[in-house]
């Protein structure tokens, strides 16, 4: 399974944008890039996913490098509620292969 | 729309016992997958069910098993419990289970084996 590499931790000031990087140099052409986040005592929460093009939703934006070997999750204006562990993972697009591999994630701390 | 529901929320068992965990997916979701989360190993994939059939399996011993019912509800069973089985067990559902479908997680069952 293709792996992802993320920094262990990051800090950001409240109300500023946050850019969370992820490297996935062994990504295959059919791998979707997913981002999830996990708050304490909760299950992971879906944030965003994409295949080739940049994606935006109400929570965040996903910027995918042209060669797809890296991506960046962008939180446009961090709040204290965004403090969580963020996971970047790859999911195969082939129907019937639900086997997402989670790494250790990035622990994001928001400074008031 | 109700989210993914896992029961019970907490469980304490003794070594050698067995345990059954339950997961009710979001209505309309046909794929249910299970994950084990521990501080040392992070989130590890156990198995995935789609339309009552196990489609994928992670690298866990045969003591870990599961099943899915016709209403998509799923159960996970762990037999002959070991201390190392203490973990947060998470269930996730998705519409069809392919990599392009977002996973929706429950809040997990915290299992403690003593």
Image: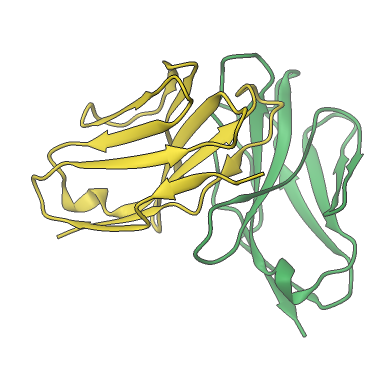
Chain colours: A green, B yellow
Left or right of residue A19, residue B77 in this image: left
Q: Quadrant of residue A75?
A: bottom right
Q: Where does the image place residue A37, in percent across and percent down from the top left?
A: 65, 54
**Vertical side of A13 occupied by B34: above or below:** above
Q: Can residue B42 be seen in this view?
A: no
* Quadrant position of the C terminus of chain B in the picture: bottom left
Left or right of residue B12, residue A8 in this image: right
**Vertical side of B88 occupied by B28: above or below:** above
What's the residue at 88%, 75% (across, down)? A15
Q: Nearer the viewer, residue A13 or B21?
A: B21
Q: Where does the image place residue A78, in percent across and percent down from the top left?
A: 82, 69
Q: Can residue B77 be seen in this view?
A: yes
Q: Quadrant of residue A7?
A: bottom right
- Outermost residue, bottom side: A112
**Vertical side of B30 occupied by A56: above or below:** below
Q: Nearer the viewer, residue A10 or B23?
A: B23
Q: Where does the image place residue A21, in percent across and percent down from the top left?
A: 76, 52
* Quadrant position of the N terminus of chain B in the picture: top right
Q: Which of B57 and A9 is in front in this view?
A: B57
Q: Where does the image place residue B80, in percent across and percent down from the top left?
A: 12, 39
Left or right of residue A93, residue B26 in this image: left
Left or right of residue B103, residue B4 in this image: left
What's the residue at 58%, 51% (across, down)? A44
What's the residue at 57%, 15% (across, down)? A96
What's the residue at 72%, 26% (across, down)? B100
């Amino acid at each position: 399974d293709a792996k992802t590499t993320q920094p262990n931790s990051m800090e950001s000031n409240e109300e500023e944008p946050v850019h969370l990087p992820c490297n996935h140099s062994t990504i295959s052409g059919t791998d979707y890039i997913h981002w999830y986040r996990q708050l304490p005592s909760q299950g992971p929460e879906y944030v965003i996913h994409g295949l080739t093009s940049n994606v935006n939703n109400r929570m965040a934006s996903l910027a995918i490098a042209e060669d797809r070997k890296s991506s960046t999750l962008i939180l446009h204006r961090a709040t204290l509620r965004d403090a969580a562990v963020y996971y970047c993972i790859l999911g195969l697009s082939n129907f019937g292969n639900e086997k997402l591999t989670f790494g250790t994630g990035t622990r994001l701390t928001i400074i008031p | 729309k109700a989210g993914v529901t896992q029961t019970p929320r907490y469980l304490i068992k003794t070594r050698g016992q067995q345990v059954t965990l339950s997961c009710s997916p979001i209505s309309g979701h046909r794929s249910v997958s299970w994950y084990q989360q521990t501080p040392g190993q992070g989130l590890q994939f156990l198995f995935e069910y789609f339309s009552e059939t196990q489609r994928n399996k992670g690298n866990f011993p045969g003591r870990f098993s599961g099943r899915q019912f016709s209403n998509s509800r799923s159960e996970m069973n762990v037999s002959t419990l070991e201390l190392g089985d203490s973990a947060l067990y998470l269930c996730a559902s998705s519409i069809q289970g392919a990599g392009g479908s977002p996973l929706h997680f429950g809040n997990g069952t915290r299992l403690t084996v003593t």
